[in-house]
Amino acid sequence: MGYISSSALVVVYFCAGLVHAGILDSLNWARSDRIEVNLPWLPYENETRCYDELGCLNITRTWYHLINRPFNVFPLPRSVINTRFILYTRLNPTEGQFIKANNQSIEKSNLDIKKKIKFIIHGFIDTPLSNWVGDMRDELLKYQDLNVIVVDWAGGSLPLYTQATANTRLVGLEVAYLINYLIKNYEVNSKDIHIIGHSLGAHTAGYAGALVPGLGRITGLDPAEPYFQGMPAHVRLDHTDADLVDVIHTDGKGIFFLGYGMSQSCGHLDFYPNDGKEQPGCDITQTPLVPLTLIRDGLEEASRVLVACNHVRAIKLFIDSINSKCPYIAHACPSYTQFKEGRCFTCKSSTSCAIMGFHADLTPGLIESNDIQPQSKKDEMVGNRYFLSTGKEYPYCHRTYRITIELARPTYAESWVQGHLKAAVHSPSAVIYVDLTPSGDAKLEHGARYTAIATHPVDLAGNVRKVELNWEYDMNVLEPRTLCLFWCNDHLYVRNVVVEEMEMPGRGKRDAQFSTKLCTKGKKDYADIPNRGKGIFVDGCVVSEKSARS
């Protein structure tokens, strides 16, 4: 199913989380190429196995790490893994055709070499018969008339996990050989080829891409962590494997905490929806997820929710992004916390925001004069982490809004007050509720500005009519200065509220957004909100407008 179910992995990787944190191995001494003594599980330095026309594989010391990757084996025989390629087109959208790297099978198929080619590679304990593979295929063919090739390596994706990781290298050779065959014999443009891989399939795509010069794109859907995180680039998916490598991280808690995906950046564009660890709606202790999913989607999907909901969320987000009218706009930011605080909101620079999912190649920073920019331009994005928030169920894509509160400072106001502040943003389209103090009671200084991010599936299109602020003062007995009985003022004074909605800039535009400033109706230029009271702000300061700078 694309997840790692062996409980033994948890024990093996207990120390891995500590290593990743730099506690046990801050100097990287555990790398086996630093070890001079002979270890019994290390192969001879020149141990190599060849696979007919595919080429050869070796296992050197660079493939080992005492904790991250302590064991390595060679792939199973080709006949056991039995990698197969299943072609789907609009002429045969549901009945696949098996093709091989030979003229006979290709020419008898519906493969149209003039159209783009999308490969789909499943992960650990998974098969091409999984529901998500069919869903992704259908959405791709709905979006565009192209060739979809599903890679079936079910014979090699079964436990044990160590063997499955080794098998991905041979599957990568198989995929690369077919692609290179099409390039050589049918003049297929390598830039028109896009490989989409989930979990172990993401690293398989990386192995294939490393052998195909000029491969157009690889999309990694929550690449598997065990045996890959912290390893050299040639061991895992990395940004050199294709002209564009975009990665969606959704389960990066670490294997010790039953997180199966990598948290490490490994592409040109690395997306971390909801911080890339815990996805909304995946906490089975909070909601009756499994029974509802069992009734609605069947046993297979219910088992995925039970075992690997976060890990498979990357698949769902990608599938949703193919034909969704809602853009998955993500923002480069040092952390998800700072993103939620509204500190990383604009798309002014070419690397400050990006589109997550199927349309990642339309990210403005990658486009210049209708062409993909040179590799050096995309390399500027390597290492950036792009954050966004999504919903807990379909539609997953949410619009992003930044709420800015400007506090007034009249002479009779306290210099600061402590408490909870919530907002309700009213529009004819929807009402958005946002907690402006999500970490609990917050210290708010009069005269300062505060921002927070809110998300909602509905596009308000700048049509914000009213904002209601609810204020509750919070006294803490452990902090005498917060005790407000007879000698202090527990009111909050707010000058105005600004609601902004980010849009992805179009071609020829540097930045574009809706911005609405709302003020109080009273004679004063600020609202006096008492403890447990409400302040109302309306669109009367500045007419809501859409501003765009070319």
Image: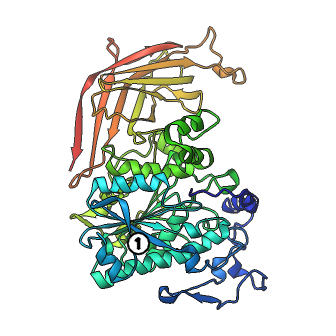
Quarter location, residue 36: bottom right
Q: Is residue 248 left or right of residue 278?
A: left
Location of residue 277 with respect to 196 vertically, above or below: above
Residue 353: where, in percent of width, then height? 37, 52
Rendered residue at 55%/65% (across/down): 200
Coloration of the structure image = rainbow
Please state which of residues 229 and 472 is positioned toward the viewer in this rendering.
229
Whole-percent x, y for residue 294 in the image: 55, 39
Q: Is residue 341 left or right of residue 362?
A: right
Graded by Cα atoms within 10 Å as few (under 14), some (14 to 19) or many (20 or more), the crowding at tag 1 reads many
The image quadrant that residue 287 belongs to is top right
Residue 189 visible in the snapshot: no
Element on which disc 1 rests: loop
In the image, farthest residue toward the top: 486
- Provide residue 531's location: percent of width, then percent of height: 53, 13
Residue 141, image x, y percentages: 31, 56
The quadrant of the rendering that contains the N terminus is bottom right
Quarter of the view holding residue 65: bottom right
Label tally: 1
The one nearer the camera, 217 or 423, is: 217
* Residue 35 vertical position relative to residue 244 in the rendered view, above or below: below
Q: Residue at x 67, y 22 (%)?
A: 476
Residue named by callout 1 = 242
For residue 239, side relative to residue 426 (left or right): right
Point 55% across, 79% down: residue: 78
265 vs 316: above or below: below
| 536 relative position to 2: left or right | left
| Residue in the foreground of this view, choosing between 352 and 88 | 88
Q: Amino acid at mark 1?
A: Ala
Outermost residue toward the bottom?
A: 46
